[in-house]
Amino acid sequence: MDSLSALVASMGLHGRVDLLCRYAGAWSAPHPGTPPGQVPYHVVLTGEAVLEVGRERRPFVAGDLVLFPHGSAHTMRHADGATMTFAEVRRPLGRLVELASDAPHSDFEMLCGTFELGRHRALLLRALPEVVHLHTKGRDDYAGLHALLHTMRHESLQASPGGDAVIAHLSAALFTLVVRTLMNEGDLQHGLLALLMDTRVGPALAAVIAAPAEPWTLERLAEVSRMSRASFARHFAELSPATPMDVVTALRMDLAARLLRETPRPIEQIGEACGYISRAAFGQAFKRAHGTSPAAFRRQMAHTAPVAG
């Protein structure tokens, strides 16, 4: 398994499609910020609009896909910049809710959904910009993405057996395709994904993702990358503000949080799976990363509503 696939698989990503929005006339749709680990996204199916994030305004047209890795508040408006609100009509439609303006027809249509990574899966999200905006219209190299979005729309509008499972898997595929596109287009200069793309330090990071339980040291990481210890550390620093061992610990703690939340495995076994022989050392590292002990974190997650997917 390649390093990006392994990273996405380790996150336990869940996704869903929530709304099909159909608007006409002068409309304005504000979207509040979301909690950490929840990444809203929108896909324009027809029409055009204006997307506002803070003081920034950008056109948002058919074929565009936008997601907000840090859950930023944003507003969408009619293309002429209208500020008026409108009477909403909500009705069930397949596996989602249709949200429409009170008009006999619509000239703007988009899908709205959410990727859920959980509060504790912040390492990958920190590597992404505030807004990820892809323009796919007329791009043959986005053929796979177009087909995926078409299938997601089709499944969302139906009530067919197994649809929830299909959408969950398609959502993970969509997130992965978006990240891969950013990597291929060179839009990520720093952080985790920049490290993964780098031909020199990338092999070491991929090795950690594949085998987090191994006793990783700076020397071993440099050896995997076939570099000297000093050269490895220096080049790593050019791509990431965190040290190599800080990134190793962060990857392990993200994995530990997922295992605590999603499996009944004993804490000692989870610590060992994350490279800690001592339960005390594991507990200290986990508390530094997440602000609470592994046992308390597991209890907290048990009282949290399960992630939709």
Image (cartoon, rainbow, N blue to C red):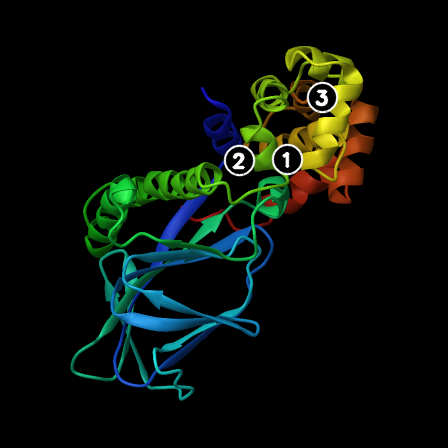
Mark 1 or 3, nearer chain start: 1
Are there few (<14), some (14-19), or many (20+) residues within 10 Å of tag 2?
A: many
Amino acid at pointer 2: Met
Circle 3 residue: 268
Residue at disc 3, secondary structure: helix
Looking at the picture, does residue 61 appear above or below residue 122? below
- Does 114 appear above or below 265? below
Q: Circle 1 — which element?
A: helix
Answer few, some or many: residues within 10 Å of disc 1's Cα (few below 14, many 20 plus, some between 14 and 19).
many
Q: Amino acid at mark 1?
A: Asp
Q: Position of residue 14 (x, y in %)?
A: 44, 43
* Residue neighbourhood size for the residue with mark 3, other residues' Cα within 10 Å, grouped as few (<14), some (14–19), many (≥20): some
Q: Which residue appears farthest toward the left when viewing the image?
A: 104
Distance CA(mark 1)–CA(mark 3): 16 Å
Give me the C-alpha separation between circle 1 and circle 2: 8 Å
The residue identified by callout 2 is 11
Judging by the rendered image, the residue that carries numbered circle 1 is 254
Residue at the bottom extreme of this rendering:
84
Q: Are marks 1 and 3 in contact (CB under 8 Å)?
A: no
Mark 3 is on which residue type? Answer: Glu
| Residue at 46 percent of width and 22 percent of height | 2
